[in-house]
Structure formats: C-alpha cells, structure tokens
Amino acid sequence: MHEHRARMTPPTSPCINVCVLDGAGLCAGCLRTGDEIARWSSMSAAEQWSLLAALGERRRRRVGHAIPSL
C-alpha cells in the first residue's frame, strides 16, 4: 500500500534540458515525444508514472540498437 500512495505523488519531470527532437520525433534528452512533453503538466500522477516506465523501455530499446553486434 505504501508504494500505491507514493505513486499518487507526481514524479519529477524527466526533462534534462537537452530539448531537441530527433528524426523519430523523440527528445534527445528525455525520449518523450513532443505531445508527451506538451501534456506532462496536465497528466495525472498515474499517467506520469506510466510514461516514466515507458521511457525506461524506450531507453533500453534505444541502447540495444546503438550497440553494434560483434
């Protein structure tokens, strides 16, 4: 139950002030789309936490593609 209460508190924005959208439409700094960046402040805490989880998965996929196979 403690984790559930913690999830009701909005997380800190994932912005790291590297605000440039790449060719795929993702921010080079936080990997959010332009729409996700624009909606962040109007999202519920649950939506923000969900997006952070999705960003973690995006980051894992991006790192996986950046490493050349040997």
Image (cartoon, grey):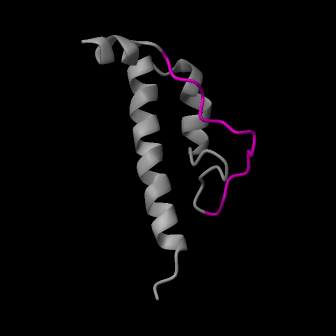
Instruction: Give the number of callouts.
Output: 0
Residue at the image point whose x is 41% and y is 51% from the top:
57
Q: Above or below — where is 58 with respect to 34?
A: below
Pinpoint residue 50: horizontal percent, then vertical percent: 39, 32
Magenta segment's dominant SS is loop
Q: Residue at the far bottom: name it.
A: 70
Q: Above or below — where is 47 with respect to 44?
A: below
User: Dividing the image into 4 quarters, which one contains the N terminus?
Assistant: top left
In magenta segment, residue 56: no
Q: Who is closer to the viewer here, 13 or 1?
A: 1
Residue at the image point whose x is 46% and y is 89% from the top:
70
Q: Who is closer to the viewer here, 51 or 43?
A: 51
* Left or right, 20 with reference to 69: right
Q: Which residues are magenta?
A: 10-23
Residue at the image point whose x is 61% and y is 42% from the top:
34
Q: Who is closer to the viewer here, 70 or 54?
A: 70
Q: Above or below — where is 64 with respect to 18?
A: below
Q: Who is closer to the viewer here, 11 or 20?
A: 11
Pinpoint residue 29: horizontal percent, then vertical percent: 67, 48
Q: Above or below — where is 68 with respect to 24?
A: below
Residue at the image point whose x is 54% and y is 19% from the top:
42
